[in-house]
């Protein structure tokens, strides 16, 4: 598939693109010119022809939506509302039908740890800009899906890691291996889904706070790394 | 812009990017609501903030004013301990075409469906920002949602009011209720109201603004939907 990956110079963007690049024709983009170590298209995602050209001919867009290093709160919120609106409207105009929006399970952490929190529960963001931005991005995406302009799959992710890198660290209950993330994106690109689908995605954990039953059922998610098992990296 | 007589009860700091054309009792300051520093400075020492700002057509300015303007306002409210905030917008901030074209008795407590119309969605993002702040901080936000404003002296009867209307004067009369109501009497820290006069069509309901705030509609624009 021909895919656009946004925030391509961010850590998450690089994790996503490194895993998808073998199977897909990727177009990488970011709102910043730097760093030049990642070959990408600079796009300010303004309301002009350049945003349409950015998405023209694509099969889908993976909206990574990360905050730039040192970026102010208003600038980031602007990127997750107005600039995302520009991108999605351009996608609609250019017949790009599938959007994979990478959100975060942190939106659900205000619920007490005693609960099993599923996709049916209402997000509870704080005004912390990185979290509020992710939430507002979901808010904007949802309206495009509601009007059947686009099919949007929101993947609310746990903390994305490379399992080998965290082998000696104490367990984070929401760890998600980057290869398993790639598999989730793959599933979300190919599954037959309604215009608006929210899916929680994290690694295998016993008695998980954010179970992945919907991910298994809807996009065939089958995490390979079981972080509950000691020496999970092996 | 006009200043109804009730404004004389309050010490006003009026802000805008243009000077108001008529006289009022109070201070005026040039403030762009999209400028966080200007909003922060203007809010210092205030007991309440009323946000009437709006921009409808240009994507950049619409989101700057309608969405980031709310963020700037809420940041200023938190910083200065201002617990009473009144924000405004059109009905489709929450009730876009997926409600308006299908349903009746639409009340202001429905989950937002703004749709992708620029004006509606940018205002709705601002609405959601206000809601998140009210959920996380000890402050109260009242959202007043309007649509058509008419002058009783010039009703323009040939233009149907979709979906609802109010006179300019009557629309402004809700604010003192919102400024005076004890905050603990509001049902929650985030309350939304449709503000329009009594209309027979049953498409939307203004019951809540009358019940909670005690505001009363005037019968001054109903000739628009009555036969000659």
Image: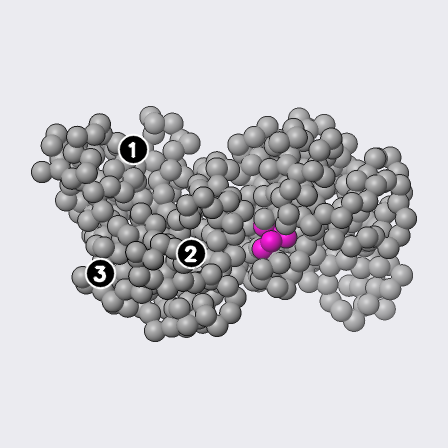
Q: CA distance from mark 2 to mark 3?
A: 21 Å
Classed neighbour count for the residue bearing mark 3: other residues with Cα under 10 Å, few (<14), some (14–19), many (≥20): few
Can residue A192 be seen here? no
User: For the stretch drawn in magenta, what is the main secondary structure?
Assistant: helix
Find the distance from the CA under tag 2 to the CA under tag 1: 36 Å
- Return the chain for callout 3: A
Is residue A71 positioned above or below A152 on the image? above
Taking A53 as reference, is A130 above or below it?
above
Which residue is at a point 66% across and 26% down the rendered structure image? B184
Q: Circle 2 is placed at which residue position?
A: A32
Q: Which residues are magenta?
A: B63-67
- The disc, 1 or 3, on the residue closer to the chain's N-terminal end is 3
- Say yes or no: labels 2 and 3 on the same chain: yes
Indicate the quadrant where residue B141 lies: top right
Q: Nearer the viewer, mark 1 or mark 3?
A: 3
Does residue A50 show up?
yes
Marks 2 and 3, the one that precedes in the sequence: 3
The front one of A91 and B76 is B76
Q: Residue furthest left?
A: A234
Q: Which residue is mark 1?
A: A209
Q: Position of residue A115 (x, y in %)?
A: 34, 29
Residue A160 position (above or below residue A87):
above
Badge 3 is on which residue? Answer: A21
Q: Is residue B64 magenta?
A: yes
Apparent side of residue B52 relative to residue A146 in the rendered image (left or right)? right
**Chain hosting mark 2:** A
User: Residue drawn 73% across and 63% down?
Assistant: B161
Mark 2 vs mark 3, foreground winner is 2
User: Residue, x 56% and y 36% (percent of image)?
Assistant: B133
* Secondary element at image label 2: loop
Residue B204, given in percent of the width and then of the height, sits at 65, 53
């Amino acid at each position: 598939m021909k895919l656009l990956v946004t925030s391509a110079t961010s850590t998450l963007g690089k994790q996503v693109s490194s895993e998808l690049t073998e199977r897909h024709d990727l177009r990488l983009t970011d709102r910043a010119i730097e760093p030049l170590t990642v070959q990408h298209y600079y796009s300010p995602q303004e309301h002009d022809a350049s945003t349409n050209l950015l998405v023209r001919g694509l099969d889908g867009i993976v909206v990574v939506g990360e905050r730039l290093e040192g970026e102010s709160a208003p600038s980031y919120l602007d990127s997750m509302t107005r600039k995302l609106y520009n991108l999605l409207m351009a996608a609609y105009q250019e017949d790009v039908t599938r959007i994979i929006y990478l959100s975060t399970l942190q939106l659900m952490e205000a619920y007490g740890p005693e609960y099993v929190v599923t996709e049916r529960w209402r997000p509870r963001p704080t005004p912390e800009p990185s979290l509020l931005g992710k939430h507002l991005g979901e808010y904007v995406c949802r309206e495009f899906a509601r009007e059947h302009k686009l099919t949007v799959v929101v993947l609310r992710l746990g903390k994305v890691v490379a399992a080998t890198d965290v082998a000696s660290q104490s367990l984070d209950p929401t760890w998600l291996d980057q290869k398993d993330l790639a598999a989730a994106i793959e599933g979300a690109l190919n599954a037959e889904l309604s215009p608006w689908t929210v899916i929680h995605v994290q690694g295998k954990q016993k008695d998980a706070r954010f179970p992945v039953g919907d991910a298994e059922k809807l996009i065939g998610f089958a995490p390979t790394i079981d972080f509950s098992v000691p020496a999970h990296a092996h | 812009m006009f200043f109804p007589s009730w404004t004389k009860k309050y010490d006003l700091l009026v802000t805008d990017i243009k000077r108001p054309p008529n006289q009022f009792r109070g201070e005026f300051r040039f403030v762009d609501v999209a400028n966080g520093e200007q909003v922060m400075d203007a809010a210092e020492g205030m007991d309440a903030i009323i946000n009437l700002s709006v921009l409808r057509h240009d994507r950049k300015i619409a989101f700057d004013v309608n969405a980031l303007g709310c963020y700037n306002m809420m940041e200023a409210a938190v910083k200065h301990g201002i617990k009473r905030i009144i924000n405004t917008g059109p009905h489709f901030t929450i009730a876009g075409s997926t409600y308006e074209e299908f349903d009746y008795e639409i009340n202001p407590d429905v989950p937002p469906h703004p749709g992708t119309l620029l004006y509606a969605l940018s205002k709705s993002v601002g609405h959601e920002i206000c809601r998140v702040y009210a959920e996380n901080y000890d402050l109260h936000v009242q959202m007043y949602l309007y649509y058509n404003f008419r002058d009783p002296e010039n009703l323009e009867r040939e233009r149907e009011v979709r979906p609802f209307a109010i006179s300019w004067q009557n629309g402004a009369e809700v604010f003192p209720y919102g400024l005076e109501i004890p905050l603990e009497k509001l049902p929650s820290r985030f309350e939304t109201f449709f503000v329009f006069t009594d209309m027979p069509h049953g498409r939307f309901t203004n019951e809540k603004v009358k019940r909670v705030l005690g505001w009363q509609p005037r019968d001054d624009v109903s000739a628009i939907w009555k036969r000659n």
